[in-house]
Image (cartoon, rainbow, N blue to C red):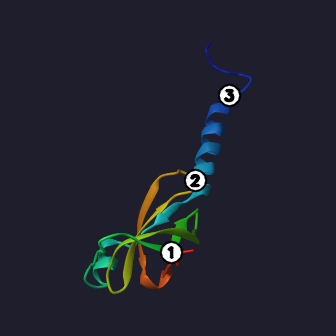
Amino acid sequence: MGSNRRYPDAADERADEIHLEQAKLGTPVSLTTAEVRRTGHRAEPPTPIPVIASVRYRVVYEEPRTVEGVALAWTNGAVLVKYPDPTTKQDRFVWVYANAVTRRTSL
């Protein structure tokens, strides 16, 4: 009584589907604190600088994605990038190596 004989695993299967869909969106992978510290002294501009950055995303594996954002801080070898995530519509903050970032030109 109270069990669903017709669709016994439907809820569990749907939960698995939702989890897989979320995993496919991926999560950005930031440099660790230790990696950022090894890159040098941190500097911050008075206003954020528009940049294009290659951010590693973990989607069951890692894949680079090009994003448009702003540089909030940097060291000799790393940059703190803020960018809007197109899937969640929330701002993301990640540290990436400096060679993964280029300054955007104004149009």
Q: Are marks 2 and 3 in contact (CB under 8 Å)?
A: no
Is residue 97 or residue 26 the one in the foreground? 97
Which of pointers 2 and 3 lies earlier in the amino acid sequence? 3
Which of pointers 1 and 2 lies earlier in the amino acid sequence? 1
Q: What residue type is labelled 1?
A: Ala
Task: Determine which residue is flagged by label 1.
Answer: 53
Q: Is residue 6 above or below residue 1?
A: below
Q: Is residue 21 above or below residue 46?
A: above
Task: Please tell me how crowded label 1 is: few (under 14), some (14-19), or many (20+) other residues with Cα within 10 Å.
Answer: many
Residue 93: mark: none
Q: What element carries label 3?
A: loop
Q: Which quadrant: the C terminus?
A: bottom right
At 48% from the left and 74% from the top, the residue drawn is: 51
Task: Determine which residue is flagged by label 2.
Answer: 87
Query: Whole-percent x and y of residue 40?
Result: 28, 85
Is residue 10 or residue 34 the one in the foreground? 34
Q: What residue type is labelled 3?
A: Pro
Rendered image quadrant of residue 70: bottom left
Which of pointers 3 and 1 lies earlier in the amino acid sequence? 3
- The residue furthest right is 6
Distance Cα–Cα, label 3 vs label 1: 46 Å
Q: Is residue 101 left or right of residue 107?
A: left
Distance Cα–Cα, label 1 vs label 2: 17 Å
Mark nearer the viewer, 3 or 1:
1
At 43% from the left and 76% from the top, the residue drawn is: 96
Q: Is residue 62 visible?
A: yes
Mark nearer the viewer, 2 or 3:
2
Query: Whole-percent x and y of residue 32?
Result: 35, 72
Task: Please tell me how crowded label 2 is: few (under 14), some (14-19), or many (20+) other residues with Cα within 10 Å.
Answer: few
Task: Determine which residue is flagged by label 3.
Answer: 8
Q: What residue type is labelled 2?
A: Thr
